[in-house]
Amino acid sequence: MQIEQIYTGSPLRNFSYLVHGGDGFAYVIDPFYSQQIVDALARSQLQLRAIINTHEHWDHTCGNAELRRHTGCEIWAHAGARHAIADIDRVLAQDDVIAFTPQQALKVLDTPGHTFAHVCLLAVEDGRPTAVFCGDTLFNAGVGNCRNGGDAETLARTIRDKFCSLPDDVRIYPGHEYWENNLRFTLSIEPHNQRAQELLMQVVQGELPCGTMALEREVNTFMRLETEDRVAAVAEFLRLRALRDKW
């Protein structure tokens, strides 16, 4: 599976993603600037099969209309996003499979929290998860906010149930580039986190690491809750989310 991470340079530091399996067809996740996607398709001689929106917020859908006009592609998203995303052709639900080849596919994860119409996409190759497209659910060293149609307690359970069990080598592809701010927040909570200190120096110098679940377990304070008690863990997550909202 080929993945092209496209940094949009938008004011909100969005990423878009072009994903394909070598058959000449591609999917784009959360297009921001349609021309960026058109150019990427032309470079790789790919035909766009569908837009996949992780959720309904405008900065993840604003490239939809122009890209659809240019390519004739379909639009796929969560059923709950119909009120906000025009012309949805396919509704995505938990455990739906988007197949590239018999060995390569994207598995849909229903991931409420940031909004209640949010999906993430787990890349599976030869039966093993290899990457996850997180939208605004999980970021490098952070998690999404819940101020625009979401719920922090629901997000806490989504992170626990859908992400914490993923293998260490699964790569993280978030909807935004928030490394520096998120690492600074981690260090405000864990000032002696040496790995976060090292990464922050690297990021400030312009070297962005490739995020993995192993790295998240080292530097993402929302995934480093010390208690094993589920109720206490949710309470601690909510405390951290409230602190991050004011930070």
Image (spheres, rainbow, N blue to C red):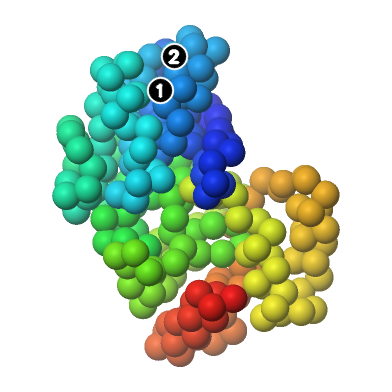
| Residue 47 numbered mark, or none | none
Residue type (three-letter) at the residue carrying disc 1: Ala
Q: Counting residues from the N terminus, which is met first, the one under dot 1 or under dot 2?
A: 1
Q: How far apart are marks 1 and 2 (CA)?
A: 6 Å
Which residue bears the numbered disc 1?
26
Image coordinates for residue 159, horizontal then vertical, percent? 44, 66
User: How dense is the environment of label 1, judged by Cα within 10 Å: few (below 14), some, or many (20 and up)?
Assistant: many
Q: In this view, does 104 lie to the left or right of 210?
A: left
Write the residue at 32% across / 32% down. Answer: 64
Residue type (three-letter) at the residue carrying disc 2: Leu
| Residue 46 numbered mark, or none | 2
Q: Is residue 209 above or below residue 65?
A: below
Q: Is residue 144 left or right of residue 67?
A: right
In the figure, residue 153 lies in which quadrant?
A: bottom left
Image coordinates for residue 58, horizontal then vertical, percent? 35, 46
Q: Nearer the viewer, residue 223 or 54?
A: 54
Q: In this view, does 96 lie to the left or right of 212?
A: left
Element under disc 2: loop
Split into 4 quadrants, where in the image is the C terminus? bottom right
Q: In this view, does 84 lie above or below 106?
A: below
Q: Is residue 103 something one can see in this rendering?
A: no
Evaluate if marks 1 and 2 touch, with contact meaning CB atoms under 8 Å apart: yes
Q: Which of 245 and 134 is in front in this view?
A: 245
Image coordinates for residue 162, horizontal then vertical, percent? 40, 61
Write the residue at 46% across / 31% down. Answer: 33
Write the residue at 45% across / 40% down. Answer: 123
In the figure, residue 10 lies in which quadrant?
A: top right
Q: Is residue 160 above or below residue 198?
A: below
Write the residue at 29% across / 29% down. Answer: 65
Q: How many labels does the image show?
A: 2
Q: Nearer the viewer, residue 4 or 225?
A: 4
